[in-house]
Amino acid sequence: MHAVETPTLHLVRHAQGYHNLSVENHSIPDPQLTPYGKEQCASLHKSFPYMDKVDLIVASPIKRTIYTALLSFASVIESKNLRVIALPELQETSDLPCDTGSSVEEVEREFAGQPVDLSILKKEEYKTWNNKKGRWAPNAKAIEARAKDARKWLMERKEKNIVVVTHGGFLHYFTEDWADYSNVAGTGWANTEFRSYTFDLSKQDGASLVETPESRRLRSGTEKPMDSEEKANIQETTQNGAEQNGYYKVSEIQAKV
């Protein structure tokens, strides 16, 4: 019996956007990268150790994530003639203006002539991708469901080294890892931080992730990973606290600004 081959995912949080500068800037719709954010992309381009292995790049359709992918992985995009695939499931968790995507038409105008694949975004079933309702709603159940859908979509790809550029809050749902989550910052991931994961095929549906030993070593030395019970306890506590504080409720967040 042959072992099932699944890809390695190199997960990247986007570079600094204007919304990262202040709470007031959370009201900016689909904000761009700051000049410093673009410098962060240049630094990631120089330091990313698996550049020659990358054979697929996927990003949230939000402008800052697509630009992070284009700038940080420009050389491999050009050398291998890759296109950044926009995957709506990877969008951020809240319904704040800064975390809400633009219309398909605006995204298409923004990235006209650039190596970006918007074919998924244009499908009929995705026409409401940025309305933050139903499967796109800013609540834990909906976010967990689309995170799982994204993992399954990626697990079935034939490519072996996939870069996934997404958002700090969503990355905790995507990895199902809440160990370093900060309720103040909304994430434990720094801008342009990357971590690498493989699929844990021992789980029931195989659509769960486990960080590679090399990735853990690069960012946290010999720190021992938490067991499943510890992770579940932290996730439940963190999610409950975040929702009670209005993290997923835009009206309450705006009232605090």
Image (tube, grey):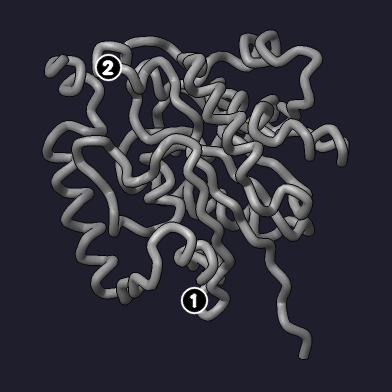
Q: Pointer 1: what residue?
A: 203
Q: Is residue 163 left or right of residue 219?
A: right
Please tell me whether residue 148 is drawn above or below residue 70 in the rendered image: below
| Residue 179 visible at all | yes
Please tell me whether residue 77 is drawn above or below residue 172 in the rendered image: above
For image coordinates 33% across by 34% down, the residue present is 138
- Callout 1, which amino acid? Lys
Dot 1 or dot 2: first in sequence order is 2
Q: Is residue 111 left or right of residue 145?
A: right
**Mark 2 falls on what kind of element?**
loop
Relative image position of residue 246 (x, y in whole percent): 17, 32
Q: Nearer the viewer, residue 66 or 40?
A: 40
Relative image position of residue 106 (x, y in whole percent): 62, 10
Please tell me whether residue 164 is drawn above or below residue 235 in the rendered image: above
Q: Nearer the viewer, residue 216 or 86?
A: 216
Q: Nearer the viewer, residue 91 or 179?
A: 179
Q: Pointer 2: what residue?
A: 22
